[in-house]
Image (tube, coloured by chain):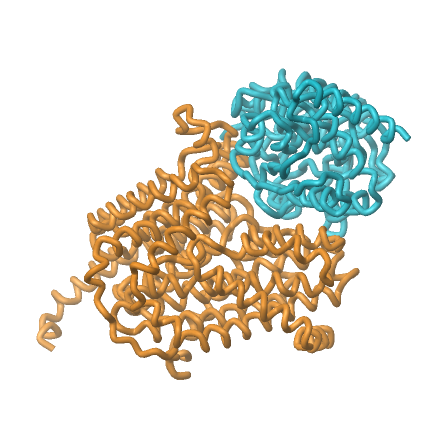
Amino acid sequence: MLIRIKTAILAACGVMAIGAGSAVAEFPERPIKIIVPTSAGGAMDTLGRIVQRAFDEKGIFDQKVVIVNMPGAGGTIGTRAVKDAEPDGYTIGFWHDGLVTSKAMGVVDYDHNAFEIIGTTGYSAVGMGALKDSDLKSLDDVIAKLGAEPKSVSVATNIGLPVHFNPLITFDMAGVEGLMVQIGGGSKRLAAVLGKHTDVAQFAVPEFVQFRASGLEPIVVFSAERDELLPDTPTAKESGIDLVLQSNRIWVAPKGTPDDVVEILSDALNQVLSDAKVKEELSGLGVTPVFISPNDTTAMLENYRELVSPLVANAKSLSE
Amino acid sequence: MDQLASALVHVMTPVPFLWLLLGVSSGIFVGAIPGLGGGMLITLVLPLTFTMDSTNALIMMIGMYVGSVSGGLISATLLRMPGTPSSVVTTFDGYPMAQNGEPGRALGLGIGSSVIGGLISGFFLVVLSPPLSIWALSFGPWEYFTMIMMGMILIASISKGSMAKGLLAGALGMTAAMPGLNESDGQLRLTYGFTVLSGGFNLLPVLLGIFVMSQILKDAISIKNVPKLMVSSRAIFPSWRQWAGHSVNLIRSSVVGTWIGILPGVGASISAMVAYGMAKTFSRTPEKFGTGHDEGIIASEAANNANVGGALIPLVTMGIPGSPIDAILLGALVLHQIQPGPLLFATNSSFVWALIAAYLVANIIMFVLMTLSVKHLARVINFNRAYLLPAIFVFCLVGAYSLTNRMFDVWVVLGFGVVGFLLDRAKVPLGPFVIGFVLAGPLEAELRSGLQLSQGSLMPLLTRPIALCFLAVTLFTLIFPIVSDQFKKARKRNSPAEETL
């Protein structure tokens, strides 16, 4: 019903736009490019391809939707390409909360405010995990150990990205200091924990479900409530750390893209996300398939920026 | 074993077999063309496979993976243009052998070593997957660092031609690896404010520039007087006795390739480099490496094919990709609604066995297809370059562009093409350049990770046994030639009579 009303409003907008001689009369008139800031393969790229396929199969647009991979420099080559693209809605992209941290680290001079936010196509609940036979069984254990001896717990990170900042935020709130070690991407972090090279690392909840059989044990989740996939794992709040974090899949368009075009795109994503097959595929990818509106997305990112900003000097000091 | 047998039977039934055959042949084709590769092919066909049966789709992709790694040797041998990054090392000896009038033999050695390397790593995949993937976890930053350093020193220690020029090339290669976002401290380095440089120079465009574009320039300049080589138009396979003589090298290179394949984040080009370095070190005739030596081709090709099987080991046992192409395969699994991970073997065992069987059969198909086509392929060496070079030029630029969809990478190919051409003119070897370029990044990153872990202490080099072993081999390789020289001199002084013999 809601969608139908929106379509009606959009149609009205469209009519007005024609009157005003705007280019968005019948958006889209040509193929839409989705810029993926990673190489082919991997969770981000796969998410883009699931959405692209849904667009095509469901015929949401009359036009083709294509995936363009632009990997490199922690995703900033791709996000910069979106930022600098023509603001007409034909070039869009998506990324995660690294949109905020890349600016904080000084790698780029823009964050989410340099874009029009289209919305969020789901998120992964995240938590920290340790090896099953480690003596670190909970966040309390980690904080107690670090309280007794600073830097006595090592954390596998990928510097400057949320997997690095989230443990930093946690430890900062607990008033302790962990040993941050640059390890790299997800599979290297997993190997570092399983191989006992580092003590803990952040993973997404579905990764815990997937790799529990290999000995990866979740010790805390950063959700508001216990995750239904991991009912035995306490939240950070239960350890007295009032912190809720998640890894979002944020869709953006260049600044200045017309509002009605952004709304068409936003509705299209919302429609895709309500499809049962897409929901199932995203779940298989470790993403909770919930559409989050542009306004709520912006609020989340602002909140995250406030958490990250005070820790930038600390994050940059990660060094031998 | 029953499951493997039934999976092999399944793969040999007409429909899966045809998909596999299609995969391997298209893989060989893109592998042989510089600029195009297996990753690109699999990404392109992925959307086309959505309507296919998921097992058949993955079987075809495995075929493409095996084919593309193998096809690279053709252009590397005949044109000194590596078709894929993993066949860079094959140019060191394959091309000189072809130029010495034996292209059939060079291809035969490469194809034979590829299938043997592929099957040896297939053996590990079938028999030892679980323990190997657990053992691989014991490799941390210090082990990676010392292993890569060992590879670097092994190749550098016995340098062909001028030692100074080899070191210069290596240093230049390492310099080219420096710009961009430094993964050890999260900061931009040496980008001079140019945002296009924030990702640094990518491997593929640099390799295409240094090896392929420079060779195109070189060939274009001397296009009128390319010598006609008298080639025998058959694959010339060494006799069984000769293969037996190479068995140690074959097994060692395959084991090295398999092992490096298992480690996440270390590519097939590195496994060929390490295997080549080890072959050179253990060879009785190290001075022949780089002049068209059997052992060099064998080491490179056995290792890069073994790398494919090795990289599948963590994929099937733990759901961890061992290489970029495996990451694409992992994404394909998700798109085909198969949940990868450690439970895959338990929940979908017949599917996993079908993949393993497909890998084994793909190696055989690759061998047959390439052997049959060598007769025609070897003629490429005398093909009119005026037709060949423009086509390769276009593929190089298209391949580089499609990697990140930016013009920047096209300029990188052209720029490094000029650099490679000038270096070659100045008789500076290109091999050490590429080795320096490929190994500098992981070498630095792993050392700094290790130092972050030990809070600045170098002690883990001595306290971690595997790291200590690698370090010992490295030091031995550095010191041994000096000591043995001294020893020989001393012996000559003691028995002057021997000199007359």
Task: Examine the rendered structure and indicate whether residue B57 appears above or below residue A115.
Answer: below
Whole-percent x, y for residue B148 in the image: 44, 49
Examine the image and state in which quarter residue B23 appears.
bottom right
Residue B308 appearing in the image = yes
Q: Residue at x 69, y 36 (%)?
A: A202
Examine the image and state in which quarter residue A271 appears.
top right
Q: Residue at x 56, y 27 (%)?
A: A86
Q: Residue at x 43, y 40 (%)?
A: B409
Q: Residue at x 9, y 70 (%)?
A: B496
Whole-percent x, y for residue B150 in the image: 40, 52
Q: Quadrant of the C terminus of chain B?
A: bottom left
Q: Is residue B237 left or right of residue A164?
A: left
Q: Is residue A287 left or right of residue B193?
A: right
Q: Quadrant of the N terminus of chain B?
A: bottom right
Q: Is residue B80 left or right of residue B458?
A: left
Task: Examine the rendered structure and indicate whether residue B326 appears above or below residue B279.
Answer: above
Apparent colour of chain B: orange
Q: Is residue B25 left or right of residue A128?
A: left
Whole-percent x, y for residue B239 in the image: 38, 83
Apparent colour of chain A: cyan
**In the image shown, does B314 or B158 lie closer to the viewer?**
B314
Residue A175 appearing in the image = no
Q: Residue furthest right?
A: A1
Whole-percent x, y for residue B454 in the image: 53, 36
Examine the image and state in which quarter residue B333 appears.
bottom right
Q: Residue furthest front?
A: A19
